[in-house]
Image: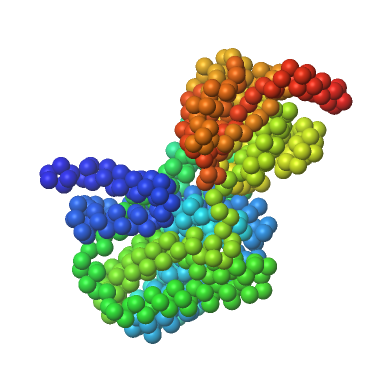
Amino acid sequence: MEIVDSLMVKIALIGLLGIGAQWIAWRTGRPAIALMLIVGIIAGPILGIIDPERDFGALQEPIIKLAVAVILFEGGLSLNFRELRQAGGAVTAMVFVAGPIAWVLGTAAAHYGAGLSWEISALLGGIMIVTGPTVIGPMLRTLRVPSRVRNILKWEGIVNDPIGALLAVGIYAYITYEGPDANIAVISMDVLAASFIAGLIGAGLGFALTWLFPRGKVPEYLKAPFLLVTVIFGFVIADLIKHETGLITVTVMGIVMANRQIYSSQALYRFKEDLAVLLISGVFIILSATLDWETVQQFRPQFVIFLILLLFVVRPISVLVALLFSSVPWRERLFIAWIAPRGIVAVAITGLFAIRLVDYGFPGAEALVPLSFAVVIATIFAHGFSASWVAERLGISEGKGEGILIAGANRWSISLGKMLKSLDIEVLVTDNSKFALRRARSEGLAVRHGDVLDEAHNDNIDMGEFQHLIAATDNDSQNQLITADLGPEMGYEQISRLANDGQSKSRVGHGRLLFESGTDFGTLLDRDLAGWRFSKTNITEKFTVEDYRKNLETDEEPLAVFKPDRRLLFFATDARPVIEDGDVVISYVAPDTPEERKADRAAKESEKNGES
C-alpha cells in the first residue's frame, strides 16, 4: 500500500478516475457528472484511497479556486453575443429576475425547511442560485434540445456563478462585521465597488490579449500558455482585492475574448477546452472525495424538506415567474424550470465560508457542508438522469443526430444525397457557390450557401444534427482542412473525404478516404458521366453478404451500410463495417447494360452542355 500512499500516484489516479468516468459516460450515454461523483465517493470516503485534506493540505483550497477560475474563463469564452439573438431577453430575466427570487425563496426554504438561522439561510440561499458550467456543460453535451434552451442554461450557469459567490461574500461580511457601520448599504457598496474593479480588470485583460494576439506580439506556440497565465494572474489580483471577485474577472475576460477577433489557430480553443475537461474531472473527484463520514453524520432528516423545496418549489417558481412574459415556449420553460444541477462552485464556496464561520463561532455553520453536498448529489442525480427523459416527455428532445452533411455540391455528391434521402435520411449540402447549389436544391435537397468551416464555427449549423460528414469538394486541401478542423468536434471516425489525386491516398492523418479502394474525385465524376449510379441492396437470410459480393462487377464496391437503428456506416480505406442480416448496403455500380450506359451518358452530356 506504500505505492498508493504516494502523492504522485494519487494525482495520477485522480486524473485517471475523472477522465475514465467521462469516457464511460460517453460510451453509455449516462451523465458524466453523476459518474464522477460516484467514483469520487468510492475512492474517497468508502475506500479511503484519496483524502484531499490529508493529501494536499493547505494546497487544496488554492488548487480548487484556480481550477474553478480557469473553468469559468473557459465558460465565458463560449458566451458569444450572437447566441442572444434568440435568448437575450430570457437570459436577462434568468439573471436579474429568477436569481433574486431564487435567493429569497431559497433563504425561506433553508430557514423553515432545514431549521437554519436567518443569517446562515441567507448565505446558503445566495450560494444555491448558482448552476455552474462544471455540471451544465457535461449535461448539455449529452442532450439534444433546442439551441435557445441550451443558450439560456449555459449563460445562466456561467453568469450566475460569480453573482452567487458575491452574494455569499456580502452576507458573510454582514454576519461577521463588528464595526459601528454594520449596515447593508455600506457592505453592498463595498462588494459592488470590488465587483466593478474586478470586472474592469477582466475587460482590460481581455482587450489587451485581443490586441496583442492578432498583431503578432505573442508567438503562436506561446499563446495558449500566455493565455492560461494571464487568466490565473487576473483571478489572483482581483481575489486579493476582495475574496471571490476573481470569478467576475475571469468570466468578463472570457466574454470579451469570445466577442472579439483573435485571429489565432483553433489549437488555442482546443487547448482551453481540453484543459477545462481535465480540471472539471480532477476537481470533481477531489471535492466528492472530501465527503467524509463525519460530514455525512451531520446530515439531519429535516434537510430532506429543504431539498424537496429547492427542487420542486424554489427553482420552478423563480424560472416560471422570470419567463412569464418572454417568448420562450411553455414546454421549454418547464424544462428550464426543472434543470438546475449544482456543482464545484457551490460546494467550494459553501465549504470555504463554513470553515470561516465555524472558526468565527457562529452557531449552525457546521450544517452548511453536509447541506451543500446533499444539494449537489440530489440535483446531479435528479436532473442528470432525468433531463433526457423530461425533454422527451415535453416534446423538445431533438433526438440523436441522424443526418448527413455533405461539403461540396457536384454531380456525384448530389446523386449520393438523393440516394440517402430515399432512405429517409436528412441531408444538408453546403458549398461556396450558389450556382453549384442550384441543382442540389432542384433535387429537393436542403442546402446552405457558405464555407462549412465558417458555418460550423459561427454556429449557423448545428453539428449535433449529423452522424457523418462527407468532405466532397474538388479541392483536396480543403477536404483535408475540413477533416482536421471539425474532427475534434465530431470525431474523426465520423468524417470521410474524397481523395482528389493519387498522392492523397497515401497521406495519413487527414481523415478517412471514402471507398475501400479510395477512388479519387476525378474517377468518380468520370464514372458519373458514364452512367454509374447508387444502388441499395437488402441483406437477408436468402440473399446473404456472400451473394451480394459475388454480384459486384469490376470496380463496383459498397459505399455504406444502413443499419436498422438508422446508423449509416461508411466504407473507407481503413474502415470495413460489418454487414449483417437486415442491413441495407449502398453501392456505387455501373449501368446494368451497354444500352443503359449509352443512354445515361447521353443524358449526362446533354445536361452538362445545357449548364455550360
Q: Nearer the viewer, residue 116 or 331?
A: 331
Q: Is residue 418 visible?
A: yes
- Residue drawn at (62%, 34%), measured in percent from left and top? 536
Image coordinates of residue 377 in percent, x first then y, are: 35, 65
Q: Quadrant of the C terminus?
A: top right
How is colour applied across the structure in the image? rainbow
Q: Is residue 560 left or right of residue 137?
A: right
Q: Is residue 161 left or right of residue 331?
A: left
Q: In the rendered image of this protein, does residue 43 appear above or below residue 354? A: above
Q: Quadrant of the N terminus?
A: top left
Q: Is residue 601 visible?
A: no
Image coordinates of residue 301 in percent, x first then y, are: 29, 79
- Residue drawn at (53%, 58%), measured in percent from left and top? 154
Q: Is residue 209 left or right of residue 454?
A: left
- Residue drawn at (43%, 75%), measured in percent from left and top? 310
Q: Residue furthest bottom?
A: 112
Q: Nearer the viewer, residue 434 or 53?
A: 434
